[in-house]
Amino acid sequence: MKTIHAVAAVTLAAASAVQAMISCDANNPCPSSSPCCSSYGFCGVGAYCLGGCYPKDSFSMDSCMPAPVCKSSDYDFTNMDGFIENTEYLGDPSTGNWVFSGNPLMYNNEAVLLTMTEDSSGT
């Protein structure tokens, strides 16, 4: 009986999570509570409003953050200074020069290796 209750609870939780994901497209823009439409067709806030945000499918045309302007510079890759994890970057280019997901590694204190885990999405 405990197994049945546990399975029912997990099923209910999974169904609730799926219902919580709000889909968006040209005919169904995002609500103000989750104003940004991602490139995967789901509404959200924070990282959803950065690169890959679709203004036409979002709550309003200014829901998405503008992309930072590129600037010419010389970079030293002898340490991880200037790297920021994609879950922490919220559109302010002064917080870091490079945004990453995964586990970048230092190589001989002179280079940074960009790694991709086996279960990554490849982006």
Image (cartoon, helix red, strand yellow):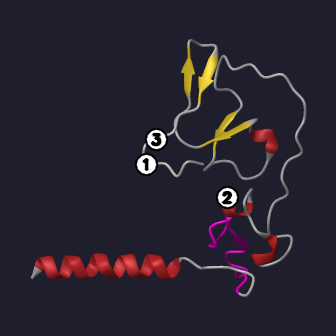
Residue 69 located within the stretch drawn in magenta: no
Q: Position of residue 43 (x, y in %)?
A: 65, 73
Q: Secondary structure at mark 1?
A: loop
Q: Which residue is mark 1?
A: 119
Quarter of the figure with the N terminus: bottom left
Find residue 40 and name its label.
Answer: none
Q: Residue at x 66, y 16 (%)?
A: 78
Report how far apart the C-alphas of labels 1 and 3 lie in the structure: 5 Å
- Which stretch is magenta? 28-45
Question: Of tags 3 and 2, which is closer to the observer?
Answer: 3
Q: Whole-percent x and y of residue 86? A: 63, 47
Find numbered disc 2 in the image and state the secondary structure of the residue it sits on.
Answer: helix
Instruction: Determine the residue positioned at 67% across, 58% down.
Output: 47
Q: Is residue 34 located in the magenta-colored stretch of the structure?
A: yes
- Answer whether labels 3 and 2 touch (C-beta < 8 Å): no
Q: Is residue 2 left or right of residue 24?
A: left
Q: Which residue is mark 2?
A: 47
Q: Position of residue 50 (x, y in %)?
A: 74, 58
Name the residue type under label 3.
Thr
Q: Is residue 116 above or below residue 65?
A: above
Which amino acid, mark 2?
Answer: Ala
C-alpha separation, residue under disc 2 versus residue under disc 1? 21 Å
Residue for badge 3: 117
Labels 1 & 3 near each other (Cβ < 8 A):
yes
Q: Is residue 109 above or below residue 22?
A: above
User: Which residue corresponds to the image point at 83% horizontal and 77% vertical from the top-left?
Assistant: 60
